[in-house]
Image: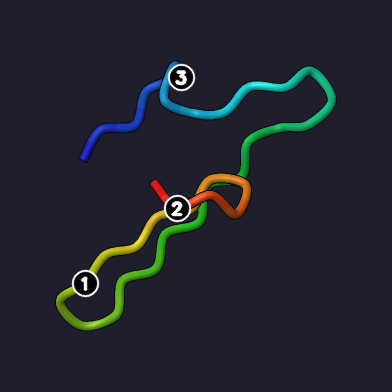
Amino acid sequence: FDVGYNDLPTRGDIRPVLQISCLGHALHAFVNDVYI
């Protein structure tokens, strides 16, 4: 999948953190602990 700048939450005081975990056949992505 393609994650663009506009897909990430924006706040002036924090930088987005992208976490991707791939376990078996499932892919889970979180940005600042928000599931996308």
Q: Which residue is mark 3?
A: 5
**If you read the primary sequence from the N terminus, does the residue marked by circle 1 or circle 3 appear first?**
3
Secondary structure under tag 3 reads helix
Query: Which of the marked residues, 2 or 1, is nearer the chain's N terminus?
Result: 1
Q: Which mark is residue 26?
A: 1
Q: Amino acid at mark 1?
A: Ala
Circle number at residue 35: 2
C-alpha gap between disc 1 and disc 3: 24 Å
In front here: 35 or 14?
35
Residue 31 shown left or right of residue 23 in the figure: right
Vertical relation: 17 (above or below) 16: below
Q: Residues within 10 Å of mark 1 (few under 14, many from 20)?
A: few
Mark 2 vs mark 1, CA separation in Å: 13 Å
Q: Please state, as top left, top right, bottom left or bottom right, where the N terminus lies in the image.
A: top left
Residue sitting at x 53%, y 45%: 31
Task: Describe the element under mark 2 as helix, strand or loop.
Answer: strand
* SS label for mark 1: strand
Q: Tell me residue 7's x, y (percent).
A: 41, 25
